[in-house]
Amino acid sequence: MSLENKTIVVTGAAGGMGRATVDMLLKAGANVVACDLNTDSLETYQSFKNFLSFAGNLVDEHTVTEVFQKAHQKFGSIDGLANIAGIAQSAAPIDEVSLEQYDLIMNVNMKMVFLTCREAAKYMKKQKRGKIVNIGSVAATRPRPGLQSYVASKGAVESFTKALALELAEHHINANVLHPGPADTSMLAKFTKAGGDVQSTRKEVFESSVPLGRLIQPEDIARSVKFLLSDEAEMITGAVLHVDGGRNI
């Protein structure tokens, strides 16, 4: 699954899944544009000729425009987009969720996906090719109590991606959604209700819910993202890929 000389924009690049994806794509020969609020943890890649980092808030449309402009100027094309950036919801009943919390979750998990996909489409349409992978969540398929706003945001990502796949098909652009299960990253702890025991929740709620018996590793997601961005996924579009150890069943 070589991605030699293909330019891939990765959001949430400094997180667990994002960093694993950046590493895997670079090793596959891709030009990687790594985006996050803070990219200090990606310093090790700065000397790579096929690497470009961008620190900024991708909920702002002018920032998104700038990212893609710089990526195209440096590498000459936009061949793929991997939307890995996301924010968790601390489990809470709906009457305890503020409008500010809801807006933040929807902005990061859905508005950012809209803005980056919109910008990517401008370049991909001209090229008559491109692949988009948006990260959703198994929570959209198997919701848990107290995560209503997060579930809504990820459900929106799934519906949006399917609609996008139909719309962009005539331009030979693929769009797919990947639903991770409970993952062994720092984000997992943020789903614990305020004041809750993170370790017991991790073991008794999340890990025990995975039929294959372990939490999903960042590399599990990175491998699947790489596949969906590759030429081997040429006829896959509008698909929902669960990488969750069977949690969705």
Image: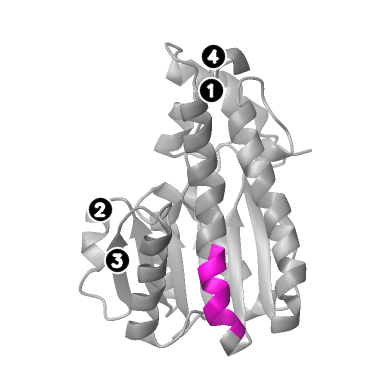
**Spatial separation of the CA atoms under disc 3 and disc 2:** 11 Å
Q: Judging from the image, what secondary structure is the residue with disc 3 in? A: strand
Q: Tags 4 and 3 in contact by the CB under 8 Å rule?
A: no
Q: Residues within 10 Å of mark 2 (few under 14, many from 20)?
A: few
Amino acid at dot 1:
Lys
Residue stretch rendered in magenta on the structure: 117-125
Q: Is residue 122 magenta?
A: yes
**Spatial separation of the CA atoms under disc 1 and disc 4:** 26 Å
Which one is earlier in the sequence, the residue at label 1 or at label 4? 4
Task: Give the residue number, with chain letter if any, for mark 2.
Answer: 41
Q: Residue at x 44, y 28 (%)?
A: 189
Which one is earlier in the sequence, the residue at label 4 or at label 3? 3
Q: For residue 203, which numbered disc appears in the image?
A: 1
Q: Residues within 10 Å of mark 4 (few under 14, many from 20)?
A: few
- Inspect this view and state whether residue 194 appears: yes
Q: Nearer the viewer, residue 145 or 28?
A: 145
**Spatial separation of the CA atoms under disc 4 and disc 3:** 37 Å
**Spatial separation of the CA atoms under disc 1 and disc 2:** 28 Å
Q: For residue 53, which numbered disc appears in the image?
A: 3
Q: Tags 1 and 4 in contact by the CB under 8 Å rule?
A: no
| Residue situated furthest top in the rendering | 195
Mark 1 vs mark 2, foreground winner is 2
Looking at the rendered image, the quarter that the C terminus falls into is: top right
Q: Judging from the image, what secondary structure is the residue with disc 1 in? A: helix
Q: Residue at x 64, y 50 (%)?
A: 157
Above or below for 193 versus 62: above
Where is residue 127 shown, x and y percent of the image? 57, 88
Q: Quadrant of residue 48?
A: bottom left
Amino acid at dot 4:
Glu
